[in-house]
Amino acid sequence: MDKASTIYLLTFIRNRDRATLQQLVMNYRPNGTEMDTVIRTIQKNYLERVWIL
């Protein structure tokens, strides 16, 4: 798992910071780890829900 991606994801979770999550989703590059699945799921939900949170 990419360390920078993990930090961004944890920052979002702790602070509910949508800008941080959007930055992660928009700039993430798949690297063959479990984080790829996490990011794909977030991207799918982001595109479907368009931040109804």
Image: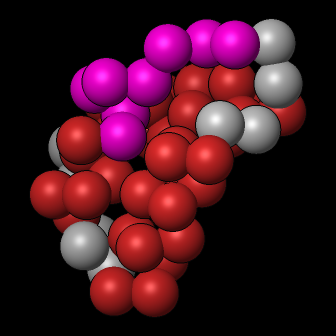
Along the line of sight, which residue is nearer the eye, 19 or 52?
A: 19
* Residue under the image location 65 percent in, 37 percent down: 2
Which residue sits furthest left? 19
Along the line of sight, which residue is nearer the eye, 48 or 20?
A: 20
Q: Is residue 41 visible?
A: no
Up-down relation of residue 27 to residue 24 (above or below) = above
Q: Is residue 1 visible?
A: yes
* Residue under the image location 50 percent in, 46 percent down: 4
In the picture, the quarter occupied by the N terminus is: top right
Does 27 lie within the magenta span?
yes
What segment is highlighted magenta in the picture? 24-31
* Residue under the image location 43 percent in, 57 percent down: 8
- Residue 48 placement (x, y as % from top left): 36, 33
Up-down relation of residue 25 to residue 4 (above or below) = above
Does 25 lie within the magenta span?
yes
In the picture, the quarter occupied by the C terminus is: bottom left
- Residue 45 placement (x, y as % from top left): 45, 40
* Residue under the image location 16 percent in, 57 percent down: 19
Along the line of sight, which residue is nearer the eye, 52 or 4?
A: 4
Query: What is the quadrant of residue 40 in the picture?
Result: top right
Which residue sits furthest bottom? 14
Up-down relation of residue 29 to residue 18 (above or below) = above
Which residue sits furthest front? 3
